[in-house]
Image (tube, rainbow, N blue to C red):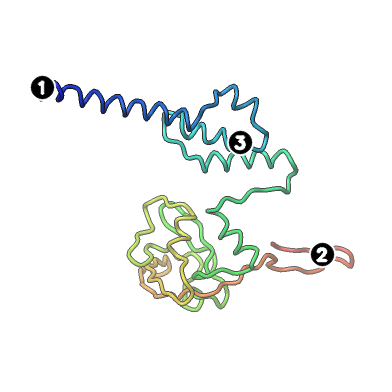
Amino acid sequence: MRRKHSYIWPTIIASAVALGIFVGGKLHFNDTPEKLFTTNSKKDKLNRLIDYIDYEYVDEIDTDSIVDVTVNQILEKLDPHSVYIPKNEMDRVSENMKGDFVGIGINFYPYKDTIAVIRTVPKGPSYLKGIKSGDRILMADFDTLFGKDLSSEAIIRKLRGKKGSSVKLRVYRKEGDKIFTVDVKRGVVPIKSVQSYFMLTEDMGYIKV
């Protein structure tokens, strides 16, 4: 009798699990794809579609990226001035609108496998520490910045931080072929949308942005 029960219980448990999966699926999505796209309202259709993909698609899907792409395509149909700003870009856009940011005050570009300084912001943190155009930033604190093919966003994250915090930079200067270390305290750096301007004639002006 005991041996008979040992065979029955695994069967009961397996059946219960299978039934739960089946019922759960029906409760989550009792609409067929045809019903999903024909009977739901226009406002609800997009949300239902994303839920359907998230639940039914075999591979794991980043639904946030799907939403971003979809919203961008919708706005492109409106006019050239309507844009969607993803969450990960909001801080950068807000800084540009605000007119300043907290950082070390340099313009840079990735050159070969290093970070080359284009210019330092006058009176900014790096300017006051003697960093010059053409210098190469090799390290920020203990993070190596050369030979990694880092994106501009990744570099910015390493160089920026809280106001008053410091970052130790390892810098190479071609002039004199020397490497030196300098501590730079992060501060508020103004963003100038207009670099310079002057009048060419009485009715024509020049603006550098």
Type of amino acid under label 2: Gly
Q: Are marks 2 and 1 in contact (CB under 8 Å)?
A: no
Q: Alpha carbon of mark 2 to alpha carbon of mark 3: how far?
A: 49 Å
- Which residue lies under the disc numbered 1? 1
User: At x 36% / y 72%, what residue is drawn?
Assistant: 181
User: At x 43% / y 75%, what residue is drawn?
Assistant: 165
- 78 vs 147: above or below: above
Residue 85, how many percent across, how many down? 61, 51
Residue 199, how many percent across, how many down? 82, 68
Residue 119, how many percent across, how many down? 54, 67
Q: Alpha carbon of mark 3 to alpha carbon of mark 1: how far?
A: 56 Å
Quarter that holds the C terminus: bottom right
Left or right, residue 190 beside residue 174: right
Instruction: Say what secondary structure mark 1 lies in.
Output: loop
Instruction: Tell which residue pokes out farthest to the front in this image.
Output: 1
Left or right, residue 116 beside residue 72: left
User: At x 60% / y 24%, what residue is drawn?
Assistant: 35
- Can you tell which mark lies on residue 46? 3
Marks 2 and 1: which is nearer the front?
1
Type of amino acid under label 1: Met
Residue 166, how many percent across, how many down? 41, 74
- Which residue lies under the disc numbered 2? 205
Return the residue nearer the eye: 135 or 87.
Answer: 87
**Of pointers 2 and 1, the one earlier in the residue sequence:** 1
Q: Alpha carbon of mark 2 to alpha carbon of mark 1: how far?
A: 100 Å
